[in-house]
Amino acid sequence: MYRKSKKRFLELKIMSKDLIVQKTTIIGEDYNTLIDNISTLWVKAKEKAVNAVNTELLEANWQTGKYIVEFEQGGKVRAEYGKQLLVNLAKDLTLKNGRGFSRSNLLYMRKFYLSFPKSETVSHILTWSHYFEILKCDDPLEMQFYMKQCINEGWKVRELKRQMKSCLFQRLALSTDKEGVLALANEGHQVMKPQDIIRDPFVLEFTGLPQKKRYKESELEVALKANMEHFLLELGRGFAFIGRQYQMQIGSRIFKVDMVFYHCILKCYVLIDLKRAEIKHSDIGQMNLYLNYFQTEVCQPDDNPPIGIVLGARKDELLMEYALQGITNQLFVAKYQLYLPKREELQAQLDALLGNEE
């Protein structure tokens, strides 16, 4: 009798523990859901608040610019006064309202209105910090391009600054014709075909490698991998890093390609081989071998044919033309440089392309 009672007591005790654990689990799940719901609510509320503040700030800056321009256009007396207008405004507005009304800021507010005279053309997706950088462009086409790219690719201000310093607009524009430049400005950089991912040159200043110092190809490769975020920004939208020194066994030999990516928009592999010096014709044949291997051994039925890019410090255009003749694979050669390009030189070439030479 005692043993039966003790056994029953133990059973009841175990059942009680199970119920407590089950109840605690249920309460725990409900509590976690409560936490998640409240957190999500406040994240969205903060986002809405930030967006609302940004909208009001853009509107105020645009309207300020409008007031200044209209005042300047108000007659000869005001035109004379306008020579010192921004200087006087900066002093008086700062005295009355505090910071944010420096002569530089007022100058950009004025340019903001002149560049976007219709307020509905101002995108509230971008912040004033974005516009502050974009307004540094003198060319309306360039300004429009960076605006579109920020919207299309979600660039932060830091990324926008880097792309502007690397003269991305000029580099892309010089690879097309006059109609292509206009499309670039109006639509941003669209990736529709393999040629659209090529920049010539690719700018790799972020690697930190000295321009004139001798370095190994492996050092460049390591530097690119260490700065992959910057490299992906330079390559453009759609690239996903697969790996470096990708091994391929062909017959009894092992081959390695420096870097392999997958392009999510073009739906294909992209192979990059790095050359420290000038690209040789034999480098073309080697990359063609890699592409044939990938097409047969790696690509899935729904993948598009792979793309190969041989990236070197220098290239002989005529030699490359002959080396690429007859190759059916998507194979490209391009230069890279370890320093930011000179904007004036690229702009002069672009002006010549557009027929803007004086």
Image (tube, rainbow, N blue to C red):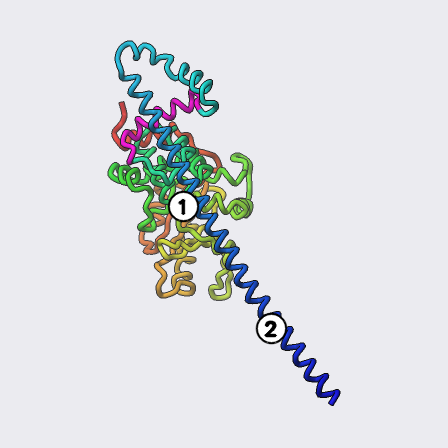
Q: Tell me where residue 27 appears, x and y as whole percent.
A: 56, 64
Q: Which image quadrant: the N terminus?
A: bottom right
Can I make out residue 314 in this image?
no
Extent of the magenta region:
101-120
Residue under label 2, please give it: 19
Please tell me how crowded label 2 is: few (under 14), some (14-19), or many (20+) other residues with Cα within 10 Å: few
Of callouts 2 and 1, the N-terminal one? 2
> How many labels were placed on the picture?
2
Q: Which is more toward the observer, 140 or 201?
A: 140
Q: Which type of secondary structure does the marked residue at label 1 adopt?
A: loop
Q: Which type of secondary structure does the marked residue at label 2 adopt?
A: helix
Residue under label 1, please give it: 236
Residue at point 34%, 38% (across, down): 123
Q: Is residue 20 left or right of residue 73?
A: right
Q: Is residue 168 left or right of residue 253?
A: left
Which residue sits furthest bottom?
1
Residue at point 28%, 37% (across, down): 181
Q: Is residue 198 above or below residue 82?
A: below
Q: Tell me where residue 85 appears, x and y as whole percent.
A: 37, 15
